[in-house]
Amino acid sequence: MADPWQEAMDHAVEVARKAGKIIRDALQNEVKIMCKSSSVDLVTKTDQRVEKLIIESVKGRFPKHSFIGEESVAAGQPCILTDNPTWIVDPVDGTTNFVHGFPFVAVSIGFAVNKELEFGVVYSCLEDKMYTGRKGKGAFCDGEKLSVSDQTDIRKTIIISELGSHRDPETVSKVFSTMQKILCIPVHGIRGSGTAATNMCLVASGAVEAFFEIGIHCWDVAAGAVIVQEAGGVLLDVDGGPFDLMSRRMVSANNKTIADRIIKEIEIFPAERDDVPAKK
Ligand code: IPD
């Protein structure tokens, strides 16, 4: 049977490439920064321009589809996943990297139908690597099939974690305490690329065993979630329950043994959700 979402996925790849070119070109020019919710939550003209390009291009082709986009939500649009086919877009994942010229920036496009993720496209545009995952059909990077690491010994792993835009001392200290405990298991190392989507592709590629973060958003992880699962990995909530795209917390790992070992050390379980607006 023909894949009902193949056309949408092909379009996602095409528009992600176009978006990546805009990001590369913008890096050559001056980067204009604005602040989103705090002095560390950055948004640039490029984030907004790229999101507009993606949404307009998708709307032109699939007028009945819905969108959740990082910049649209920041501008007050709702962040609610319905049963309608929905594109979940982070136009520039790694905005802080982009502003500083740190060389990892990704365009992340996830696609869900009936609240189930169907495909994910992550274009790591400075490395020029196109990652794709289609439910039930595997994950690929530039056409090469991806497989997670087969490591089950936590002491032989590299783990990724990041702080995102959290800067309140209590959260920072709990996240660091979790990282410290994991580092002292010991593991081989802790890393971070500065883009959640790329971090997940690194799990899918087998370069690292796991990536966990508290405070991520649905647009950071929607595409990567499909890619990790299709590469044979697992996704869980940080409390060990099922992964919830809207819960702003996630462990992605090569297998459940590694995920469970990380979860044992996590000591922070915030209740914020993307689909519940924060109280002002
Ligand atoms: C951020 C990146 C970063 C992660 C943050 C995200 P943005 O996305 O993915 O790696 O640690 O939590 O907010 O803001 O650059 O799109």
Image (spheres, helix red, strand yellow):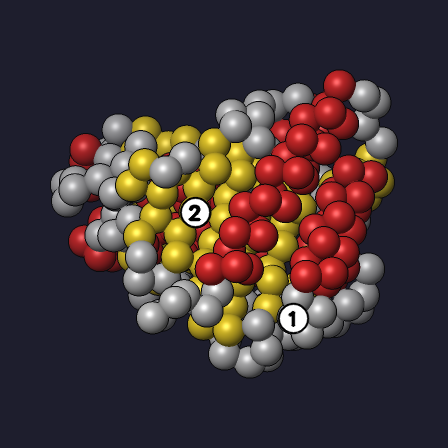
On screen, residue 168 versus residue 242, left or right, reads: right
- Quadrant position of residue 76: bottom right
Q: Name the residue under label 1.
A: 65
Q: Look at the picture and state if 82 lies above or below 9.
A: below
Tell me the number on the disc at residue 86: none
Q: Earlier in the sequence, mark 2 or mark 1?
A: 1
The residue closer to the viewer here, 172 or 3, is 3
Q: Is mark 2 on a helix, strand or loop?
A: strand
Q: Does the residue tagged 2 have its C-beta within 8 Å of any atom of ligand 1?
A: no
Q: Name the residue under label 2.
A: 132
Q: Does the residue tagged 1 have its C-beta within 8 Å of any atom of ligand 1?
A: no
Q: Residue at x 63, y 50 (%)?
A: 90
Q: Residue at x 55, y 60 (%)?
A: 8
**Considering the image in quadrants, where does the N terminus appear?**
bottom left
**Outermost residue toward the front in this view:** 1
Q: Which residue is drawn at 72% across and 54% down?
A: 57
The residue type indicated by label 1 comes to His
